[in-house]
Amino acid sequence: MDLAFLHPLYEHPGPWASVYVGTSRHTEDTPHERHLTAVALARDLDRQGADEATCRTVREALDELRHSSEPNGRALFARAGEVVLDPPLTRPPNRDSALWAPLPHAAPLLELAGEDPVCAVAYIDRTGARFELRSALGSQDAGSVTGRQWPVHRTSTVDWSERHFQLKVENTWERNAAEIAEALAACQEDTGADLLILVGDDRERRSVHERLPAHLRELAVEAPHGTGSRLLDEDVEQARADHVRRRAERELERFLAAREPDGEGRAAAVEGVPALVEAAREHRIDELLIHPEGPDAHREVWIGEDPDQLAVRRTDLKILGEQHSWSARADDALIRSAVATGAPALSVTPAAQEREVPVGGLGALLRWT
């Protein structure tokens, strides 16, 4: 996950209100229920010590979502009576929550707004294709391509003239498949789609798949159910989930290989809070890997005003010359450091059941050993 959009959260000092609220439920009572949620979360922040202006701002911002049709939910980060950032979520939170802390509680975003592959779905028939972009936030038209319209259908007769006609049919379809593949490749380049999903009859899907450029064939998935099937949406979501899982698996494999020391005893990956804190102070984190269920994610560390001012013990910060310090969650402190140095972060949860994860749930690939 590219963390650049979080920069505004670290341009101001804390403390911060971090709120996660779901909007996936839609009934006649939803507006009233969301109003009650807004009141309850604002009251929760008040009990945690948040200032009155921030509590009021959060309540008003949540109240504005009463009639929202957003499919998943929203995160709100507020301080000093102002909502600084309110990104939409790509999946609903397990529960609505509010936290008042020295740092924004950004770690849940890795799972709730992180890996959201954009899919270019191609609805293919023998005369062309229609393209659609899909993500967790909805779908939109992405254009179409029309090939030759005649002849495209086989006949059942077998005399010489009909065999000649069949050959023309095959030639027409082969040209159309090539045109569709070329247009789909252009669509992917224009949109930056992470995944291509081919929908249509078996032969039509396969013909287009085979004609895609080599680097796109690995991104293409053939949906087993057709355009009119109610199962197509499930096919798309499964393809997206598989893509996220494979990405997490690849990064975990890189991490596990990199943590093995080289001939000089140096590793290109670290795990555990002390080693990660040291790497963050030295701006060496190249990619941060987080398993939110790991015990180290919410372990206490100590932070100063700047992103590279963090330590395992409060006394360590004083030794480093930092006069002001606050306790913070380890995952949130490391994310702040990653944002400051332009390092991405990734939740390894999708691959956690099949692969070994960093000890304690926190690890990093390093920029240099």
Image (spheres, rainbow, N blue to C red):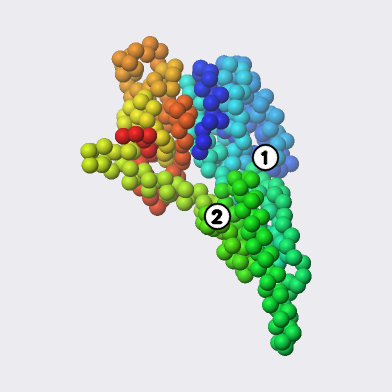
Quadrant of residue 316 in the image? top left
Q: Amino acid at mark 2?
A: Leu
Disc sitting over residue 216 in the figure: 2
Q: Which residue is mark 1?
A: 70
Q: Give 309 or 81, whichever is nearer the viewer.
A: 309
Q: Sort mark 1 into few (<14), some (14-19) or many (20+) by Cα contacts within 10 Å.
A: some
Q: Residue at x 52, y 51 (%)?
A: 243
Q: Give 260 or 102, whichever is nearer the viewer.
A: 260
Q: Residue at x 68, y 29 (%)?
A: 63
Does residue 203 lie above or below 345 as drawn? Answer: below
Q: Secondary structure at mark 1?
A: loop
Does residue 361 lie above or below 57 as drawn? Answer: below
Q: Amino acid at mark 1?
A: Glu
Question: Distance between the Cα atoms at labels 1 and 2?
Answer: 31 Å
Q: Give 259 or 65, whichever is nearer the viewer.
A: 259
Residue 214 spot, x, y in % from top left: 53, 57
Q: Secondary structure at mark 2?
A: helix
Does residue 12 lie above or below 219 as drawn? Answer: above
> Farthest residue toward the bottom?
159
Q: Residue at x 64, y 39 (%)?
A: 23
Pick the quarter of the image with the C terminus: top left
Residue 278 spot, x, y in % from top left: 33, 27
